[in-house]
Image: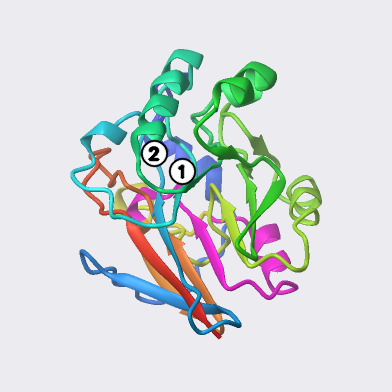
Amino acid sequence: MRGVLRKKSRVLLYRNFGAEACTCSQPESVLALGSTFSFQAFKDENQRMKLVVISDTHGMHEKIPHIPDGDVLIHAGDSMGKGTLEQLEALNEWLGRQPHRHKILVAGNHDWCFQDDPEEARRRVTNAIYLEDSGTEIEGIRFWGSPWTPVFFDWAFNLPRGDALAERWAAIPDNTDVLITHGPPMNILDKVGERFGGQHVGCEALAERLTQLKLRAHLFGHIHESYGREEIGRCLYVNASTCNGQFKPDNEPVVVDVGAA
């Protein structure tokens, strides 16, 4: 989450971001290297789909040692460093070299060009489906993507906590199967490191909206230190941050198998 643009104190950044966040305990999450997780969504027992999920590559996508094979490659935001159109061109070229039949891209708080020059940025994404408060359906699985996170300093796609964010989350269709947001909901894989106070900094309004949905998976990033997964009820939650807390792309892509219900 630390920025190259508009550089501020990292400690203050997190205090400002989550000063009033809930301090409830977060369930322990473990994501072993090479792990594959699954959920059931198809009626046909022979139908399957493999999702490969990454996030927070911060322009270091070329340094990911291995991108697993799959049907849909999903990037949950902060794909760039400074978020320039030139960096977007490089990302788009890299996406075009990946063998996955489908690619989905969501913006994050570093991805400035999608906010500052949205028409041109969208035009340059030719090798992925770009989702911004919008959805797509692939082989019967309904995806919805959104870039928004609670405001902290002056970043792209930031909104104040409360009604402004709730309005964005209200747009998520009730029949969504897989939700892709850049940031996490409150108290699910949203805890920053102890050097920043160990706070939970996810979005309360998003957490509330999730109680009204019947998602099978929620995929996000943003909080590098909370890379991992949780299974709560029938929903699989994945923080797929590729970069760790030291901004090194050490976390492996997360593979999610979609099978028959």
Badge 1, how many Cα within 10 Å: few under 14, some, many 20+?
Answer: many
Residue extending furthest toward the top = 86
Mark 2 lies on residue: 11
* Residue 208 falls within the magenta-colored stretch: yes
* Residue 178 falls within the magenta-colored stretch: no
Residue type indicated by callout 2 = Val
Q: Which residue is at 77% across, 54% downward?
A: 166
Q: Which residue is at 35% across, 44% downward?
A: 99
Residue type indicated by callout 1 = Tyr
Q: Return the residue nearer the eye: 201 or 127.
A: 127
C-beta proximity under 8 Å, tags 1 and 2: yes
Mark drawn on residue 14: 1
Left or right, residue 175 beside residue 218: right
Above/below status of 152 relative to 226: above
Question: Which contiguous range is marked in magenta?
Answer: 202-225
> What colour-coding does the image apply?
rainbow
Q: Which residue is at 39% across, 39% downward?
A: 11
Could you give the CA–CA distance between mark 1 and mark 2, rounded to whole angstroms? 6 Å
Left or right, residue 245 beside residue 213: left
**Residue 58, position in %: x, y?**
36, 32
Q: Return the residue nearer the eye: 47 or 188.
A: 47
**Residue 74, position in %: x, y?**
47, 49
**Residue 231, position in %: x, y?**
46, 78
Callout 2: helix, strand or loop? helix
Q: Which residue is at 46% across, 59% downward?
A: 190
